[in-house]
Image (cartoon, grey):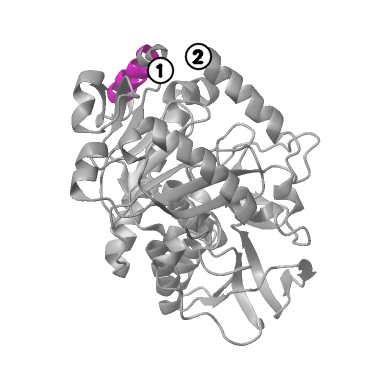
Amino acid sequence: MKYMSYWHDSATPFADAQAGPVTGRVDVAVIGGGFTGLNAARKLAREGVSVAVLEAQHIGAGGSGRNGGHLNNGMAHGYAEAKSHFGAERAHALYKAYDRSIDMIEGVIEEEGIDCDFRRSGKLKLASKPSHVAGMRASADLLNREVDPDASWIDKADLKGEIGSEAFHGAMLYGKSAMMHMGRYVQGLATAAHRHGALIWEDAPVTGRTRSGTGWELTTPKGTIRAERVIAATGAYSATYPGAPLSYFRRRIISVGSFIVATRPLTEAEIAATMPGNRTCVTSMNIGNYFRLSPDNRLIFGGRARFSAVSDQQSDAKSGAILRQSLNRIFPQLSDVDIDYCWGGLVGMTKDRFPRAGEADGMIYGMGYSGHGAQMSTLIGQSLADIAMGRPDSNPLAGLDWPRIPLHSGKPWFLPLVGLWFGLKDRLS
């Protein structure tokens, strides 16, 4: 078994990083080399703006290369809950923003010639308990009626053509959802940004930020660079570099571990018996699971196996063992299938689980995707580029208040309590 991301291991590493020291002056410096930061850089470079990307490790090292491979439309919340929180008009606009971002990803892939196995698969949200069916069916009807005509309900009797498991009692189908190879997409974004003129440094964590005239000077172990504007696109990893000038975001982001295993490639018979519909799937539990087939037919199976903010080999191995048990419960026919990969990563959660983008603390920022970043971050990256160029109107998250989390400075000491609470809710629902 490899304790590394399947997406990292099966993608060609980015080959065009700057070889020399971090130096010079640019219009915009981007902190973070994931989907958000790279699409911001790509957009800026295409419009003739000088831009540099500073990545602490390697391109796609964080959430963009460690997720489950889903591009699911819809929000972390139910649409009805978003309506209650924001009102009908704002909830409708936010829901449509996720649709637009998946459309944008598809367009970027075509425009830049990125080979990443993008496919409009559709998503199933699977009812894990009979008690979940009525509410989920009502949610599907509301979506179909008000905001998503491609959303529908599948009864349990009709699930056999979609998934080879007796564990579920019906499902919401989101027809616009998609999937892709995340590692190849993030490398393709970086290659496109470089081709359009962006400078990209790897192994260059930002350790300091000071005023320099009308702009900023960013310090890294490889040198310093000056920029008029700074984009922070660090998400959950804002808390992993204590010396970085990201304290504003650390106090507002909760970094939560999410863990994934990938099986050996399945045979055609095994696929027919487990995932005949070949869609992205998520379960309806608070501490649930998500899964899909990879381009080479592995079952990629993940979830919040443990409420931890640590992802290393020891932590990932513990979580992988828990995921194996969950996989066996859902697909007992795969209980003897080997696990080839086990990895973890951090998800950047906000207190209300809605993402944020805008300007604060002298920086432009986009983060807090709360488990839905793969699908939303490309659109937000473009919006951040627009803000840097004086065009703020494209930001679908404009104006959302983002208060700090009380007693939180970056290390989420309260995660075990959160896990207990969600576990109790799952037992009682």
Callouts 2 and 1 close, C-beta under 8 Å:
yes
In the image, residue 368 sits, relative to residue 159, either above or below, namely below
Sequence-wise, which precedes: disc 2 or disc 1? 1
Disc 2: which residue: 429
* Foreground pick, 220 / 240: 240
- Helix, strand or loop for disc 1: loop
Residue at position x 19%, y 49% in the image: 268
Q: Residue furthest bottom?
A: 20
Which element is circle 2 on? loop
Question: What residue is shown at x 44% (from left), y 28% (from top)?
Answer: 89
Query: Which stretch appears magenta?
Result: 134-145
In the image, what residue type sits under mark 2?
Answer: Ser
The answer to which of 327 and 212 lies nearer the viewer is 327
- Badge 1 crowding class, 10 Å Cα cut-off, few under 14, some 14 to 19, many 20 or more, is some
Question: Residue 29: horizontal and vertical position, in percent?
Answer: 61, 69
Q: Amino acid at mark 1?
A: Lys
> Closer to the camera, 424 or 136?
424
Residue 399 is situated, as x and y percent measured from the top left of the image, at 59, 39
Q: Residue drawn 19% across and 23% down?
A: 158
Counting from the top left corner in percent of width and height, residue 198 is at 50, 76
| Residue highlighted by disc 1 | 129
Position of 224 relative to 34 (above/below)? below
Whether 179 is among the magenta residues is no
3D distance between C-alphas at marks 2 and 1: 8 Å
Confirm whether residue 383 shows in the render: no
Q: Which mark is residue 311?
A: none
